[in-house]
Image (tube, rainbow, N blue to C red):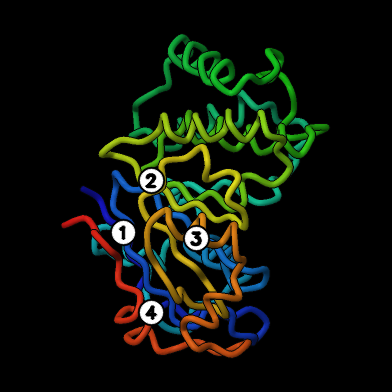
Amino acid sequence: MRKLEIKNLHTTADDFEILKGVDLVINTGEVHAVMGPNGTGKSTLASTIMGYYKYSITAGDILLDGESIIPLTVDERSRRGIFMAMQQPYEIPGVTNADFIKAALQARMKEGEYLSLYRFIKEFDKCVNDLQMRQDLPHRYLNEGFSGGEKKRNEILQMKMLKPIFAILDEIDSGLDVDALKIVGENINQMRSPDFGALIITHYQRLLDYIDVDYVHIMMNGRIVMSGGKELIEKIDKDGYEWVRVELGLENGETKPVSTILKDCAFKGQKEK
């Protein structure tokens, strides 16, 4: 079992504090969902784990199997097995999808090892078919001229090809219609294994209808204020987020100390580790 651990993480951008003490542990074999209102720090959490330069860590740590990854660059974190599907994927004219993924795969191989072109093509074609994408995808420039839904499926394609240890999916559902949501959800489920863990960031229940989620966390004002199982998804879909503030006695912009939150909102039936 591999472990990704976020410990009392505080993050700022332009001297403004966004994350205010996030604690979260993800093990391989688990899928976690983080939900919450706009502007609560969900995407900041994803970007900070991946090492995006815009965010500065002022306290806390991010550990992969007990070792801090904060000193590592984005590409070093990627080589260690962390993958992020971006909320707004970049377009890269002149670089084809196939060449981009081949370069990423080759970068993960040991010195002197080389990618098998036959195996790459076979796996690429299978993933394209699984995601029901256009057959000319290998020759298209990365995300150039893609619809929003195509860009999001392309992120999942990269994840399937790279086979990370931990995947962070930042609002992968935006831009997807109902049919595409089902396809993406099914492909994420196919990735589930003892060697894979995922953190899914979303606003809505609709994507999580198609994904087997183990834990759900509600984030407000830069902290995780409540954690539980899939029953939280149904409650949020029905009643929104205001009930969380009421139940925890929170005012707008206020969070309880983490110790109090964990006491009040401990997992019911949490798996033994």
Q: Looking at the image, which residue sits at the far left?
A: 272
State the residue at coordinates (75%, 41%): 91
Q: Quadrant of residue 180?
A: top right
- The answer to whether any part of residue 273 appears in the image is no
Q: Which of the two labelled residues, at mark 3 and mark 2, occupies the earlier sequence position? A: 3
- What secondary structure is found at the residue carrying circle 2? loop
Amino acid, disc 2: Gly
Q: Marks 2 and 4, Cα distance to the nearest angstrom?
A: 22 Å
The answer to which of 72 and 261 lies nearer the viewer is 261
Q: Marks 1 and 3, Cα distance to the nearest angstrom?
A: 19 Å
Q: Identify the residue position indicated by label 3 in the image.
A: 34
Q: Is residue 92 above or below residue 19?
A: above
The answer to which of 212 and 146 lies nearer the viewer is 212
Q: Quadrant of residue 246?
A: bottom right
State the residue at coordinates (43%, 59%): 216
- What secondary structure is found at the residue carrying circle 3? strand
Q: Identify the residue position indicated by label 1 in the image.
A: 64
Q: Which mark is residue 81?
A: 2
Q: Marks 1 and 2, Cα distance to the nearest angstrom?
A: 10 Å
